[in-house]
Amino acid sequence: MFEQHNEGTGSEYARIFRLLSAAKEEAEKLQLRNLMHLTNMALLQVVIDWDGIDPDRELGAVDTYLSHKIVAARAIMAL
């Protein structure tokens, strides 16, 4: 009846974040503006899901979390 929601681990979210970031960089190089917008939206959704943020209740927190997740993803990439 209901789908079972399986929470990903931090490393899984970081991997998705890295893949989307790479796709965004390629879209920028090729000047594919629609794809750039889509990857930006996907990156934001990954961050929201990663921290379990409810954007309807925590509007100001989204930007802060995005900044923190960018730093965390880059740190994991450096490993």
Image (cartoon, grey):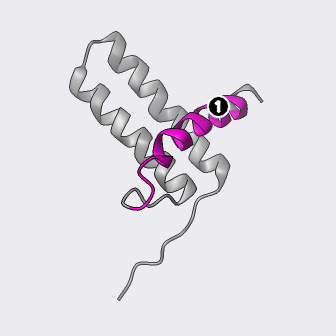
Residue 6 picture location, percent across and down: 54, 69
Q: Residue furthest front?
A: 60
Q: Residue at x 30, y 12 (%)?
A: 30
The foreground one among 4 and 33 is 33
The foreground one among 9 and 51 is 51
Residue 11 picture location, percent across and down: 66, 47
Give the mark count. Answer: 1
Q: Quadrant of residue 77?
A: top right
Q: Is residue 24 above or below residue 11?
A: above
On the image, numbered disc 1 is attached to which residue?
A: 71
Q: Quadrant of residue 51?
A: bottom right
Q: Which image quarter holds the C terminus?
A: top right
Q: Is residue 14 above or below residue 29?
A: below
Q: Residue at x 39, y 25 (%)?
A: 24
Residue 20 picture location, percent across and down: 45, 34
Residue range in magenta is 57-76
